[in-house]
Image (cartoon, grey):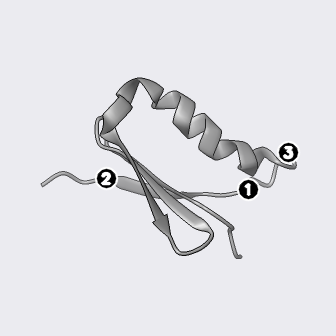
Amino acid sequence: MVRYEIKLAGPSEGAAGEGDLSFAAFSLAHAACGDDVLEVRIGERMLLVWCMGCAVMEVFGPCNR
């Protein structure tokens, strides 16, 4: 059984607007993985992205604290 580490990628407390770039950063980091990257919409404002080649999974969307 393969285990995947999942983390919620949301706006950081640092620079304003940095959270908006987290999906772009993930996409660029895994661009070479090609068809091993799967995107699944979760509800209206959330997106789960799974790179099977790198065993990385992230959830992008609004972060309610």
The answer to whether any part of residue 42 appears in the image is yes
Give the secondary structure at mark 1: loop
Q: The residue under label 2 is which amino acid type? A: Tyr
In the image, what residue occupies the spot 53% across and 60% down?
47
In the image, 62: left or right of 36? right
> Residue 4: which disc?
2
Q: Residues within 10 Å of mark 2 (few under 14, many from 20)?
A: some
Disc nearer the start of the sequence (2/3): 2
> Residue 11: which disc?
1
In the image, 61: left or right of 19? left
Q: The residue under label 1 is which amino acid type? A: Pro
Quarter holding the C terminus is: bottom right
Give the secondary structure at mark 2: loop
In the image, what residue occupies the spot 18% across and 51% down?
2
| In this view, 22 is above or below 3 | above
Residue 33 image point, x, y percent: 36, 29
**Distance between mark 2 and mark 1 Cα atoms:** 22 Å
Decide: marks 2, 1 in contact (CB < 8 A)? no
Q: Residues within 10 Å of mark 1 (few under 14, many from 20)?
A: some
Residue 57 image point, x, y percent: 41, 51
The answer to whether any part of residue 54 appears in the image is no
Disc nearer the start of the sequence (2/1): 2
Residue 42 image point, x, y percent: 49, 70
Q: The residue under label 3 is which amino acid type? A: Ala
Decide: marks 2, 3 in contact (CB < 8 A)? no
Residue that carries the numbered disc 3 in the rendered image: 15
> Residue 65: which disc?
none
Give the secondary structure at mark 3: loop
In the image, what residue occupies the spot 37% across and 30% down?
34
**Distance between mark 2 and mark 3 Cα atoms:** 28 Å
